[in-house]
Image (spheres, rainbow, N blue to C red):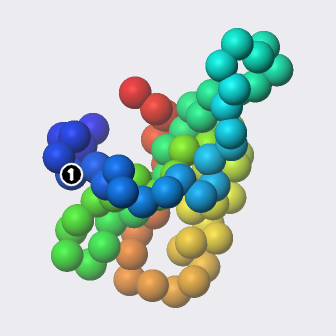
Amino acid sequence: MLPASRVRTDVPLCHAAPVETGSPDEVAPAWVVWRQDDNGNQFEVTRVPSREEADRVAATMEARGHKQTYWVSPVR
């Protein structure tokens, strides 16, 4: 896991599902999509509720053809 100082909190989590506290039907994001740029800097891209959605987001980002690497991991 990255140190808190390396995780960007100023970037909106544009793909994260909204979560309302107290609602049993809502699922909190459980997976994180990460990005590493060509300088080795790592950033959290978004949090999503399912592994399938996280994989889909990472694949979409990688398909754009940038030199960046994307991967998913469970929220810790």
Residue at the image position 39 percent from the left and 75 percent from the top: 68
Q: Give the structural element (helix, strand or loop) at label 1.
A: helix
Camera-side residue of 68 and 14? 14
Vertical relation: 41 (above or below) 22: below
Q: Is residue 50 above or below residue 8?
A: above
Pointer 1 residue? 6
Q: Is residue 51 visible?
A: no
User: Does 37 sit left or right of 12 as displayed?
Assistant: left
Q: Quadrant of residue 25?
A: top right
**Left or right side of 43 for 66:** right
| Residue drawn at (36%, 57%) of the image | 10
Residue 69, given in percent of the width and then of the height, sits at: 40, 69
Q: Residue at x 33, y 65 (%)?
A: 36
Q: Is residue 43 visible?
A: yes
The spot of residue 58 in percent (x, y) is 57, 62
Percent position (x, y) of residue 35? 39, 63
In the image shown, does 69 or 23 lie closer to the viewer?
23
Q: Is residue 12 left or right of residue 60?
A: left
Q: The N terminus appears in which quarter of the rendering?
A: top left
Q: Would you call the spot at circle 1 few (<14 residues within 10 Å), some (14-19), or many (20 or more)?
A: few
The residue most toward the right is 25
- The residue type indicated by label 1 comes to Arg
